[in-house]
Image (cartoon, grey):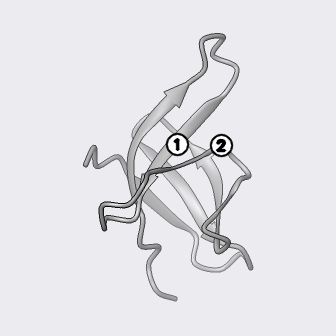
Amino acid sequence: VPPIALKFIGIVQTAAKAQRLAVLSDGRGGIPVYGKEGDIIEGRYRILRIGNESIEMAYLDGRGRQTIRLSGG
């Protein structure tokens, strides 16, 4: 299974702290993608868990679970 080719570059939290959104980049200078736990990203991946230093993602079919560390870039 190929690695998930996204970078985890930050977290956005709502004012009421009710929801955390991961900020992801494809590394090609495009517009960042935002998603919460359970969201489907780029039609291929699902965000499983958002932590303070990393997120856990998997392919939609459940294979290839991967932890992506915060890169800030």
Reply above or below: 63 against 20: below
At x 38% / y 60%, what residue is drawn? 30
Residue 10 locus on image (x, y percent): 40, 39
N-term-proximal mark, 2 vs 1 = 1
Q: Quadrant of residue 59?
A: bottom right
On the rendered structure, is 24 left or right of 21?
A: left
Residue 56 locus on image (x, y percent): 55, 56
Residue 28 locus on image (x, y percent): 31, 68
Q: Nearer the viewer, residue 56 or 21?
A: 21
At x 74% / y 51%, what residue is drawn? 38
Q: Residues within 10 Å of mark 1 (few under 14, many from 20)?
A: many
Q: What kind of element bears circle 2?
A: loop
On the rendered structure, is 68 left or right of 37?
A: left
Q: Which mark is residue 55?
A: none
Reply above or below: 8 against 53: below
Residue 46 locus on image (x, y percent): 67, 62
Q: Residue furthest top?
A: 16
Q: Amino acid at mark 2?
A: Lys
Q: Quadrant of residue 48?
A: bottom right
Q: Residue furthest left?
A: 73
Residues at marks 2 and 1, CA–CA distance in whole angstroms: 6 Å
On the rendered structure, is 63 left or right of 54?
A: right
At x 55% / y 24%, what residue is drawn? 13
Q: What kind of element bears circle 1?
A: strand
Report the number of discs.
2
Q: Residues within 10 Å of mark 2 (few under 14, many from 20)?
A: some
Q: Nearer the viewer, residue 22 or 57?
A: 22
Residues tagged 2 and 1 counted as in contact (Cβ below 8 A): yes
Read off the residue under disc 1: 22
Read off the residue under disc 2: 36
Q: Amino acid at mark 1?
A: Ala
